[in-house]
Image (cartoon, rainbow, N blue to C red):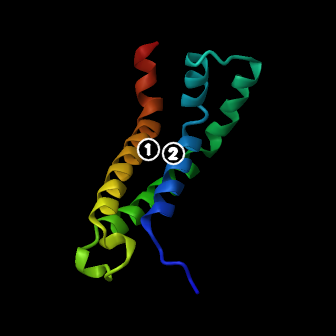
């Protein structure tokens, strides 16, 4: 029996892809701010080449999640998780948090030069 498709998998995929997309640039900054340092942090720049691919995966996942979260309530069958108002609200909040994370990953390379 197939598991019903929900937006949580797409949200998780979008969030992980956004974190991986920003691992080259935001990762070292966050690690240094947390007090974690070392020469190995410079190796995270290798991930910069894969950043556009991770962002593309994140955007596709977010479009899919948006379509699943904001679909009409009539499309949800009674008893499905999308029919519960609290779950729909929490999915919407998580969606916009992940969307903000993706926007930060997209805009970070363009904004950072203004701070140096």
25 lies above or below 115:
below
Tag count: 2
The residue nearer to you, when weighing 11 against 28, is 11
Residue drawn at (55%, 42%) of the image: 19
Residue nearest the viewer, comparing 21 with 69:
69
Direction from residue 34 to residue 63 in the image, left or right: left
In the displayed structure image, the side of residue 30 where residue 76 appears, left or right: left
Task: Say which residue appears at 50% left-offset and 49% top-offset.
Answer: 15
Q: Position of residue 17 (x, y in %)?
A: 55, 49
Q: Residue furthest right?
A: 39
Q: Secondary structure at mark 2?
A: helix
Residue 18, numbered circle: 2
Relative to 39, residue 16 above or below: below
Query: How dense is the environment of label 2, judged by Cα within 10 Å: few (below 14), some, or many (20 and up)?
Result: many
**Residue that extends furthest to the bottom in the rendered view of this protein:** 1
Does residue 73 appear left or right of residue 64 in this picture?
left
Residue 2 showing in the rendered view: yes
Q: Is residue 98 above or below residue 72?
A: above
Position of residue 5 measured from the top left corner of the image (x, y, whole percent): 47, 74
Q: Position of residue 20 (x, y in %)?
A: 59, 43
Q: Is residue 25 visible?
A: no
Distance in Å between CA atoms under marks 1 and 2: 5 Å
CB atoms at circles 1 and 2 under 8 Å apart? Answer: yes
Front residue of 106 and 1: 1
Residue at the spot 38% in from the left edge and 71% down from the top edge: 81
The circle on residue 113 is: none
- The picture quadrant where one finds residue 23 is top right
**x then y, percent, for residue 80:** 38, 77
Q: Which residue is mark 1?
A: 102
């Amino acid at each position: 029996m197939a598991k019903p498709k929900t937006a949580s998998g797409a949200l998780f995929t979008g969030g992980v892809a956004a974190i991986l997309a920003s691992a080259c640039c935001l990762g070292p900054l966050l690690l240094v701010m947390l007090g974690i340092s070392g020469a190995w942090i410079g190796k995270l720049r290798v991930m910069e080449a894969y950043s556009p691919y991770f962002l593309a995966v994140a955007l596709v996942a977010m479009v899919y999640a948006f379509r699943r979260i904001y679909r009409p309530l009539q499309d949800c069958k009674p008893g499905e998780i999308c029919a519960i108002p609290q779950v729909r609200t929490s999915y919407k909040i998580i969606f916009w948090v992940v969307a903000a994370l993706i926007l930060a990953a997209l805009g970070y390379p363009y904004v950072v030069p203004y701070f140096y």
